[in-house]
């Protein structure tokens, strides 16, 4: 048994081991699973705060510190590039051969004169 087994049986709790060690850690309430739309809004907020375009590494580091579950969900989707393909408001632009890339609003979603314009159609 122990706390690890107890938490595994409870949907609302999780055991967090320090540095991956399951013999030492703490119990915490699981954060609710964020919806894709909540994640998109968080990513848009982070890219807007960076001036409208931000490195995926920087945005993902910031997302992890704000909402770990959202960060995990983007990772499970295959990373920011694949996650952005599934949403009309986000755009991923690769750096090139080096890997990585930039996150930004799609052209028809960008902020103009302080307002966000929804895509036409």
Image: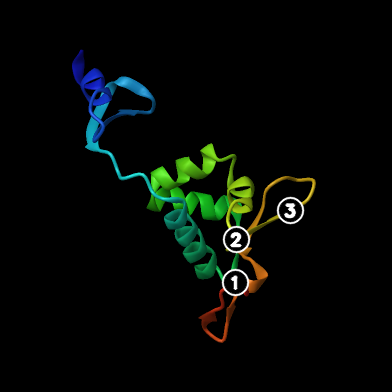
Q: Quadrant of the C terminus?
A: bottom right
Mark on residue 109?
Answer: 1
- Residue 78 in picture, x, y percent from top left: 59, 39
Residue drawn at x 42%, y 56% as measured from the top left: 38
Please give the name of the residue rendered at 52% of the width and 84% of the height, measured from the top-left corner: 114
**Mark 2: which secondary structure?**
loop
> Residue 92 falls in which quadrant of the image?
bottom right
Q: Nearer the viewer, residue 57 or 113?
A: 113
* Secondary element at image label 3: loop
Q: Position of residue 70 (x, y in %)?
A: 43, 47
Residue named by callout 2: 88
Q: Are marks 2 and 1 in contact (CB under 8 Å)?
A: yes
Label 1 or label 3, whichever lies nearer to me, is 1
Residue contact at pointers 2 and 3, CB within 8 angstroms: no
Q: Position of residue 98 (x, y in %)?
A: 75, 45
The Cα atoms of the two marked residues, 2 and 1, are separated by 9 Å
Q: Can you say whether 84 is above or below 89 in the image? A: above
**Chain-order first, disc 2 or disc 1:** 2
Percent position of residue 31, x then y: 30, 44
- Mark 3, residue position: 95
| Label 1, label 3: how far apart the Cα atoms are | 21 Å
The answer to whether 45 is drawn above or below residue 59 in the figure is below
First reached walking from the N terminus: tag 1 or tag 3: 3
Vertical order, 19 against 115 (above or below): above
């Amino acid at each position: 048994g122990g706390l690890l087994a107890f938490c595994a049986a409870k949907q609302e709790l999780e055991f967090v081991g320090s540095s991956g060690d399951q013999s030492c850690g703490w119990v915490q309430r699981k954060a609710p699973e964020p919806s894709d739309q909540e994640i998109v809004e968080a990513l848009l907020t982070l890219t807007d705060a960076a001036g409208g375009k931000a490195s995926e590494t920087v945005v993902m580091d910031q997302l992890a510190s704000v909402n770990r579950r959202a960060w995990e969900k983007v990772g499970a989707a295959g990373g920011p590039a694949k996650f952005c393909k599934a949403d009309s408001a986000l755009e991923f632009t690769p750096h090139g051969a080096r890997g990585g890339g930039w996150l930004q609003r799609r052209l028809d979603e960008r902020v103009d004169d302080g307002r966000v314009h929804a895509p036409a159609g």
